[in-house]
Amino acid sequence: MKSYFADLHIHIGWTETKKPVKISASKNLTFRNIIQEAYHRKGLDMIGIIDAHSPLVQREIQSLLQEGMIQELAEGGLRYQDLTILLGSEIEIKEENRGEAHYLVFLPYFEDMVLFSDWMKKRMKNIQLSSQRLYVSTRELQKETKIREGLFIPAHIFTPFKSVYGNCCKRMEEVLDLSLIDAVELGLSSDTEMADQIVELHPFTFVTNSDAHSLAKIGREYNQIQMETPSFKELTLALRRIDGRRVISNYGLDPKLGKYYKSRCAKCETLVIDESVCPKCDSQQMIKGVSNRIREIATLAHPKHPEHRPPYIHQVPLEFIPKLGPKTLDRLLEHFGTEMNIIHRVKKEDLLTVVFEPIADMIIKARTGQLKVEMGGGGLYGKVLN
């Protein structure tokens, strides 16, 4: 078996015909651009494109299949050169008297996603756009996913807007059938240490993904997965930890860099560490941070990791590193091929042939979360300090 790098949450911004899909995402985030960026520049082995339910996107996929640029795999997924593409959808559901939550659904084959869209468009106002509300219960969506032999993953589970713990419930069992969950996605402002304070989460495999809204953000969080080959079937086995397949590492931002780590006053934007009242303006209108929310709903005072839990490695993406600008990054890529090579494989002495020692040192420290960071919160990212 081999290990593969996988980022399973990437949005389509617009189509090549200039039609919006994810309105808040970059216009150059097209299906074609995503697969080329993920493979040639990022060096990923598997990606999940989670707006594949849009008929506008499906037309482009069909065209690329006819061109021969991509091919369908017998074990599920599409292949572009050595990159596997999983077709998914991010779906919003609002249970009665609860807030909205987002869920990821992945299906094995292109035709499966077309038929799933046909089912959803009768229960959704605009099937063309990303992350739209589906007017069914969450459990009904889970059952529909399993009927279609798909994967069901609650998305960015702690974020204060549109997530199962952050905005919907204190326990997933209140709204979900836990037996029909294949994995849970932690999101940018949390990690394993934080999530494993909740016993309900212990049985599940954790994934961490970029939730990319631009090409540059692809691969800012990702997973190292042990499989025979990168395919839908093998990923299913890995998420369920069957026959040696498994997630062997999660690579993500230090949660302090995430834009929802700490609470922030909605009125004056002061970062609030623990208080429920803003110390600056006395407002009680807070955008609740992930760390604050987890403290509210935790069932353990300290995390307890199940035996199957892999390491969560704090890693700073190259674009976050101070003084490593676009031109310097392009020089590194010219020499070393992909960002995965630079982050994981290139030795310091080889980096020094391209960049000065301070930047080489920061790249090495970025691999293992040794850089000092300033906390983010309330919608504003933290930052890496010099």
Image: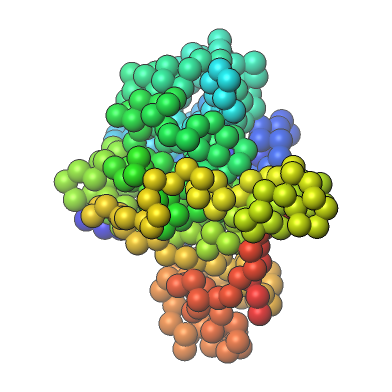
Q: Position of residue 18 (x, y in %)?
A: 73, 34
Residue 317 appears in which quarter of the rendering?
bottom right
Name the quarter where the N terminus is drawn.
Answer: bottom left
Residue at the image position 23 percent from the left and 55 percent from the top: 307
Q: Is residue 82 above or below residue 171?
A: below
Q: Residue at x 44, y 25 (%)?
A: 175
Lateral position of residue 283 relative to residue 45, left or right: right
Q: Is residue 57 above or below residue 10?
A: above
The location of residue 97, given as percent across then percent down, is 58, 20
Residue for point 47% across, 65% down: 314
Which residue is at the front of the view, 275 or 360? 275
- Position of the C terminus by quadrant: bottom right
Indicate left or right for 244 with 251 as reference.
left
Outermost top residue: 122
Decide which of 320, 263 is in the foreground and name it: 263
Against 150, is 228 above or below? below
Between 311 and 7, the one lying in front of the other is 311
Residue under the point 48% across and 59% down = 252
